[in-house]
Amino acid sequence: MHPVIRLEHPLADHHLCDIRDENTSPAQFRQAVGRLAMLLSVRATEDLPTQALTVRTPLAVAAGRRLAVRVGIVPILRAGLGMVDPLLVLIPDAEVWHLGLYRDEATAEPVSYYDRLPPGTPPDVAILLDPMLATGGSMALAIERLKRWGVRDIRTLSLIASQPGIERLTGQYPDVRIYVAAIDPELNQRSFIVPGLGDAGDRIFNTTP
């Protein structure tokens, strides 16, 4: 499978308009983020291993399948928190682990400030969440941490990515699959995605200056 999977769906296009629109209210923005995250998560989990079993319905025995892997959801604080709930709706038994990273505005490089991943026992599959894949620095730092933890199957979910960020991640981590709803061409001088949507964390949590 190609490492970059862009979600192509009419509903994704519809909700992308909402999150890009500067007139979208914080409440509407959060809802659109959640809907896009759910669409992306369906695409990103379509090949998870399952095991066969049987269940008894009120009428008879039926063949079925259940997930055969441990799934870890890893939001990058703080904006990644806005994408967690839709995944838990679909995978209610998933583990949720947090990595806190912020961007140094002077250098545009990520700085780690929170990491409570336990030693050993990593999940079989880790799904990294960050609405914006801009320079790729935060995602690369998070991927490196998950690899040190021992996760073998890492998948990233972002609503919008920049082409430079995509190129950075695919160059450094060709084994990591990147799921996005849109890929924008460039970054501005502040390393914001253009046209993008602004600051996803501020818009999710209504803290826009």
Image: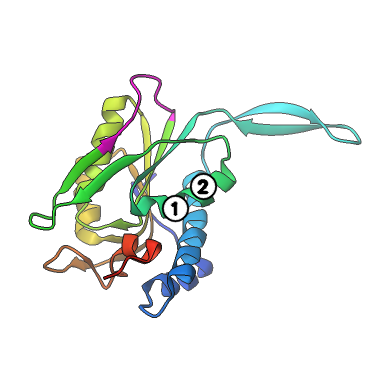
Q: Which colour scheme is used?
A: rainbow
Q: How many labels does the image show?
A: 2
Q: Is mark 1 on a helix, strand or loop?
A: helix
Label 1 and label 2: CA atoms lie apart by: 7 Å
Q: In which quarter of the image is residue 195?
A: bottom left
Query: Residue 83 has which mark?
Result: 1
Q: Is residue 203 left or right of residue 68?
A: left
Dominant secondary structure (helix, strand or loop) of the stretch shown in magenta:
loop
**Residue lying at 44% horizontally and 53% vertically, measured from the top left:** 83
- Residue 126: image x %, image y %? 40, 36
Does 116 appear in magenta?
A: yes
Amino acid at the residue labelled 2: Leu
**Residue lying at 43% horizontally and 69% vertically, measured from the top left:** 26
Does 122 appear in magenta?
A: yes
* Magenta span of residues: 114-124
- Residue 75: image x %, image y %? 38, 45
Q: Name the residue under label 2.
A: 87
In this orientation, which residue lies closer to the viewer: 72 or 176?
72
Quarter containing the N terminus: top left
**Residue lying at 32% horizontally and 24% vertically, measured from the top left:** 150
- Residue 205: image x %, image y %? 38, 61
- Residue 121: image x %, image y %? 40, 20
Amino acid at the residue labelled 1: Met
Q: Residues within 10 Å of mark 2 (few under 14, many from 20)?
A: some
Whether 197 is drawn above or below 89: the answer is below
Query: Residue 22 has which mark?
Result: none
Q: Residues within 10 Å of mark 1 (few under 14, many from 20)?
A: many
The reply to whether residue 101 is in sight is yes
The reply to whether residue 173 is in sight is no
Q: What element carries label 2?
A: helix
